[in-house]
Amino acid sequence: MSFVWSFLLVTMVTYVVSSILNVPFSLTTSLVLSVVFLILIVIISAIIPNEPTPDAEHH
C-alpha cells in the first residue's frame, strides 16, 4: 500500500512540476522517483524506534 500512495503522490508532484516548467510529463521518471521515495520511507520507518521514551510514560 505504501508503494501505491508513493506512486500517486510522486506522480501528482511530477505532473505539476513538469507543467510549471513547461516540459513533457514522463511516467518513467515518476515511477523511478516513487521507488526511491518508497525506499526512503522504509529506511526512515526502520530507524525510528517503536517503544515510547521514558519521559512519555510519566504524562
Image: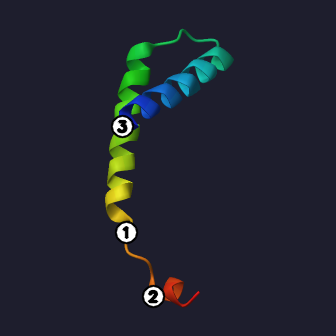
Most extreme residue toward the top is: 24
Q: Tell me whether the residue at label 1 lies in contact with that at label 2, contact meaning CB atoms closer than 8 angstroms.
A: no
Instruction: Give the distance between the C-alpha atoms of the residues marked 1 and 3, in whole angstroms.
Output: 23 Å
Task: Report the amino acid beneath label 3.
Answer: Val
The quadrant of the rendering that contains the N terminus is: top left
Instruction: Give the distance between the C-alpha atoms of the residues marked 2 and 3, in whole angstroms.
Output: 34 Å
In the depicted structure, whether residue 54 falls above or below residue 22 = below
Q: Dot 3 surroundings within 10 Å: few (below 14), some, or many (20 or more)?
A: few
Q: Residue at x 40, y 29 (%)?
A: 4
Q: Residue at x 37, y 33 (%)?
A: 3
Q: Which residue is mark 2?
A: 54
In front of the other: 23 or 56: 56
Q: Which mark is residue 36?
A: 3
The image position of residue 49, as x and y in percent, is 37, 70
Q: Which mark is residue 50?
A: 1
In the depicted structure, whether residue 25 falls above or below residue 45 = above
Most extreme residue toward the bottom is: 58
